[in-house]
Image (cartoon, rainbow, N blue to C red):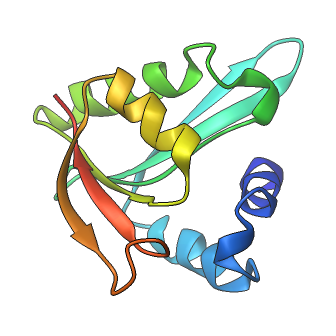
Amino acid sequence: MSIFMACLRKFPWRGAPRPYVARLIRSLPGAKIWVAEEPSAGIIGFLTLQPAEAYVDHLFVHEDWRFCGVGRGLLEIARAEAGQPLTLDVDTQNFGARKAYEALGWHVAASAGEDRERGQVRLVSP
């Protein structure tokens, strides 16, 4: 939860964290969950996957561990588990995440939200 809350603070366009925390908690019962842990640092990231849809509804990595392969590793494990390409939604304003996904070969499948600046885009894995 501490990683999730720290990441949400970096997304000022999202506003108050309460609805996002509630959404995370509601997603857990049906989700497959992977946690990345570094012995000297503890938990450094997590991913939740809705297996029936091959949909990644949460992927968060501690700020100090971004661009170290943590997210890539979690996505590779989820992709292997799903046995098919994954999808996820990313905020249009989350430029760092969008750039990282593009570097991994993900592509835009659709846009969502009335205002592209405040909406999300649906990405599909390779």
Q: Is residue 37 above or below residue 62?
A: above
Q: Position of residue 113 (x, y in %)?
A: 34, 81
Residue 102 found in image quarter: top left
Image side of residue 46 versus residue 54, left or right: right
**Is any atom of residue 77 visible in this view?**
no
Q: Is the residue 71 above or below the residue 38 in the image?
A: below
* Picture coordinates of residue 38, whole percent (x, y): 76, 16
- In x, y percent, where is residue 92? 45, 60
Residue at image x 79%, y 60%? 5
Question: Is residue 122 toward the left or the right of residue 75 in the image?
Answer: left
Q: Where residue 40 sits in the image (x, y, percent)?
A: 89, 12
Which image quadrant: the N terminus? bottom right
Q: What residue appears at the point 64 percent right and 85 percent down from the top-left corner?
A: 19
Q: Is residue 96 above or below residue 114?
A: above
Position of the C terminus, as image quadrant, is top left
Residue at horizontal 73 percent and vertical 83 percent from the top: 18
